[in-house]
Image (cartoon, helix red, strand yellow):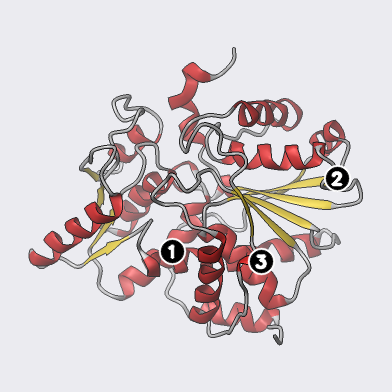
């Protein structure tokens, strides 16, 4: 496969409709005390928890492309269904409010539904319409049914999240842009690209980073730590992540040959289940907080960090390696899990 130049990739991104929502570029912080505590390698944090809108997170960056596309097609209402403490739903509700779109959220009545705190509390402040569904109901089907009802009423809906192929591909495209942003920041610091880039991701964020590295011909190992496994309706396999990489490249006008063998996406750090804290995530979060003053939540970004910490302790990374951990946010969820923190 012939590689794509930075200029061509930037040019392809610039042609897509985009709604400006995020504070960019997000910071890139070297973590000397965490690096020392773990005995190397050198660790940087790419702070996509600092994207600004609604307490930040990686979904703000993704919504720039998803909702830019939606507005260009005359969409007037967006529909999302996920866990009750969904970071995607929080950031979508805020983005919809800023852009003048109606927003319908269909959270599952899971273990955290009755406790209106964290993300659940925040979405209501942005005026989203909240229509809960039973815990065992298919969110994909519920969203499709809702979209059909809205269309029958003359509305122009767009579904986001699981099952929404175009939205998921646009979310990946956003992280092609994030990869270019990271590259420029490291160049400005006279630092080489990392040997490893860790990210908590079930599909789109990792797919965008992977697609960018492959298209540019960079030898960066993208290490996805999945916060869920095949028990969850939203889980996507390495085959599906590879397909998302190809779809993102296609949308940008490039051909990318990549299969599941190139995808590193681990479900080893899920713990008891999606949306439930793990002991390893709690320990990793405490180490980060006490060495760098940076917070991660216990059920999403914390699980990704636990994967990085585990790999370092297992000797999978050398002291000479250079690591970037892409912090995807999720911090409001901390308050919903306060009773499960060791005090």
Estimate the x, y position of residue 144 in percent, counting from the top left: 23, 60
* Mark 3 residue element: helix
As measured in the structure, the alpha-carbon distance from the residue carrying label 1 to the one carrying label 3 is 21 Å
Few, some or many residues within 10 Å of mark 3 (<14, 14–19, 20+): few
* Mark 1 residue element: helix
Estimate the x, y position of residue 127 in percent, counting from the top left: 25, 43
The C terminus lies in quadrant:
top right
The one nearer the camera, 187 or 276, is 276
* 259 sits to left or right of 123: right
The dot on residue 15 is: none
Few, some or many residues within 10 Å of mark 2 (<14, 14–19, 20+): some
Estimate the x, y position of residue 297 in percent, counting from the top left: 55, 33
Q: Residue at x 32, y 59 (%)?
A: 99
Q: Which residue in the structure is indicated by mark 3?
A: 261
Q: Which residue in the structure is indicated by mark 1?
A: 168
As measured in the structure, the alpha-carbon distance from the residue carrying label 1 to the one carrying label 2 is 32 Å
């Amino acid at each position: 496969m012939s590689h794509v130049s930075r200029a061509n990739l930037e040019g392809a991104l610039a042609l897509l409709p985009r709604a400006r929502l995020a504070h960019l570029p997000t910071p890139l912080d070297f973590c000397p005390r965490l690096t020392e505590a773990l005995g190397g390698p050198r660790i940087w944090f790419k702070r996509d928890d600092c994207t600004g809108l609604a307490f930040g997170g990686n979904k703000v960056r993704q919504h720039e492309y998803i909702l830019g596309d939606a507005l260009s097609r005359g969409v007037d209402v967006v529909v999302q269904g996920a866990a009750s403490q969904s970071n995607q739903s929080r950031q979508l509700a805020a983005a919809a409010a800023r852009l003048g779109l109606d927003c319908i959220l269909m959270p599952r009545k899971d273990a955290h539904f009755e406790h209106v705190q964290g993300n659940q509390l925040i979405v209501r402040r942005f005026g989203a319409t909240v229509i809960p569904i039973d815990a065992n109901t298919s969110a994909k089907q519920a969203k499709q049914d809702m979209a059909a009802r809205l269309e029958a009423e003359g509305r122009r809906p767009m579904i986001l999240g699981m099952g929404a192929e175009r939205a998921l591909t646009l979310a990946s495209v956003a992280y092609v842009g994030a990869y270019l942003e990271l590259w420029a920041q490291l160049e400005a610091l006279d630092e080489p690209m990392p040997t490893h880039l860790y990210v908590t991701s079930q599909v789109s964020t990792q797919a965008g980073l992977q697609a960018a590295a492959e298209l540019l011909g960079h030898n960066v190992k993208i290490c996805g730590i999945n916060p869920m496994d095949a028990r969850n309706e939203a889980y996507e396999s390495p085959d599906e992540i590879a397909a998302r990489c190809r779809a993102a490249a296609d949308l940008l006008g490039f051909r990318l040959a990549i299969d599941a063998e190139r995808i590193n996406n681990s479900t080893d750090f899920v713990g008891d289940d999606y949306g439930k804290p793990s002991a390893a995530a709690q320990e990793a979060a405490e180490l980060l907080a006490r060495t760098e003053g940076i917070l991660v939540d216990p059920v999403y970004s914390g699980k990704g960090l636990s994967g990085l910490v585990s790999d370092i302790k297992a000797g999978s990374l050398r002291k000479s390696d250079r690591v970037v951990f892409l912090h995807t946010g999720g911090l409001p969820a901390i308050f919903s899990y306060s009773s499960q923190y060791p005090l």
